[in-house]
Image: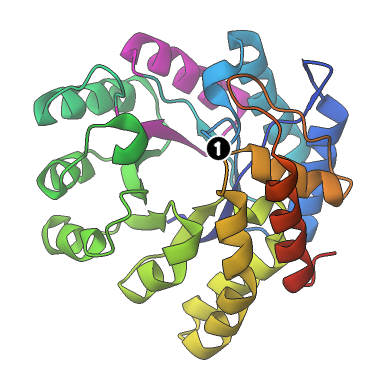
């Protein structure tokens, strides 16, 4: 099972080009800081605006630099299932430990269409698949009954739940049979998600607070919710600040304050406003990160 604090890695750019040196630096810093797993080229990694070559190269770099120290779950989803299969096969060939596959955005498929797309991806590869359910971005919602049906496929092993509905995990646990990794996709409610039976989080905040995020989930794993709440209270202003403007502008600015990479993002994401930057900086200070 996939458990703990997984980071939804940002993709660093310099002058419009992939900054490979910064990416390698971030991978090593994440692992040294206690992060339990890496998720490159998801939404936070700006997958919608990466070229095919960049998308594949980021996965290759992360797998190579990780060198088996922690799992790598590569973002390979698309609203085009043919493209999703191609990216998923590449991730397997590159050595990823699993793939994160998003629900078919924009096309607005019904539940049967969602199931068939995920099954097509599942059948094309031999590594685990995590379903990425994010109705606010994808418009469509993978309902609990469909998740249960998908969980019957041998390599569909978990979900990244970004529904924003804390009752969803309870309803899924009622119908999903067997072992399944329940991962939150929302930092601010990740602790509450764990209290409802979750196993971890694919986190944006972990890009800049990997040690604290890892400690929070380790405390949850021990059933020490008092300690995890202390960490949550330190991080809550940062969770909010990073999403006060369209992501990943906030987390890239925060990463720049730590000297990890520049704050450059790709259009249509623009640089954070000065007010937004002040909010992020204050939250970083409050958390003791700078």
Q: x, y (%) of residue 8?
A: 58, 44
* Residue 100 falls left or right of residue 21: left
Which residue is the site of mark 1? Answer: 246
Which residue shows up at 63% across the image and 61% down it? 238
SS class, disc 1: loop
In front of the other: 151 or 41: 41
Colour theme:
rainbow
- Please state the extent of the stretch shown in magenta in the rendering: 79-103
Residue drawn at 57 percent across, 68 percent down: 236
Does the segment drawn in magenta span residue 148?
no
Q: Position of residue 9 (x, y in %)?
A: 64, 41
Q: Name above or below for residue 184 compared with residue 95.
A: below
Query: Quick check: can you spot residue 69?
Result: no
Q: Quadrant of residue 216?
A: bottom right
Would you say 116 lies left or right of 80 here?
left
> In the image, what residue occupies the spot 61% across and 32% down?
45
Q: Is residue 190 visible?
A: yes
User: Looking at the picture, how far across and down is residue 49, in whole percent?
Assistant: 58, 17
Residue 286's place in the image compared with 138, above or below, is below
Q: Position of residue 27 (x, y in %)?
A: 76, 43
Count the labels in the image. Answer: 1
Taking the magenta stretch, the answer to whether it contains residue 100 is: yes
Badge 1 density bin: few <14, some 14–19, many ≥20, Cα 10 Å: some
């Amino acid at each position: 099972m996939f458990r703990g604090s997984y980071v939804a890695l940002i993709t660093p750019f310099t002058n419009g080009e992939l900054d490979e040196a910064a990416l390698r630096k971030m991978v090593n810093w994440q692992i040294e800081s206690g992060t339990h797993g890496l998720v490159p080229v998801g939404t936070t990694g700006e997958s919608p605006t990466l070229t095919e070559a960049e998308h594949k190269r980021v996965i290759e770099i992360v797998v190579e630099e990780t060198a088996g120290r922690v799992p790598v779950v590569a973002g390979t989803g698309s609203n085009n299932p043919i493209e999703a299969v191609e990216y998923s096969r590449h991730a397997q060939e590159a050595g990823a430990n699993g793939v994160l596959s998003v629900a078919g955005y924009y096309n607005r498929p019904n539940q049967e269409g969602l199931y068939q797309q995920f099954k097509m991806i599942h059948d094309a590869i031999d590594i685990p698949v995590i379903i990425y359910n994010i109705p606010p971005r994808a418009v469509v919602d993978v309902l609990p009954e469909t998740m249960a049906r998908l969980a019957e496929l041998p390599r569909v092993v978990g979900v990244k739940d970004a529904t924003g509905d804390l009752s969803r995990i309870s309803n899924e646990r009622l119908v999903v049979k067997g072992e399944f990794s329940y991962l939150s996709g929302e930092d601010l409610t990740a602790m509450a998600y764990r209290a409802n039976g979750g196993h971890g989080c694919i986190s944006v905040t972990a890009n800049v607070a990997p040690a604290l995020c890892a400690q929070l989930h380790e405390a949850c794993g021990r059933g020490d919710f008092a300690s995890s709440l202390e960490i949550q209270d330190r991080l809550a202003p940062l969770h909010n600040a990073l999403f006060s403007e369209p992501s990943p502008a906030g987390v890239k600015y925060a990463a720049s304050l730590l000297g990890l990479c520049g704050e450059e993002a790709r259009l249509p994401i623009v640089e954070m406003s000065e007010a937004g930057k002040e909010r992020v900086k204050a939250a970083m200070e409050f958390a003791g990160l700078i």
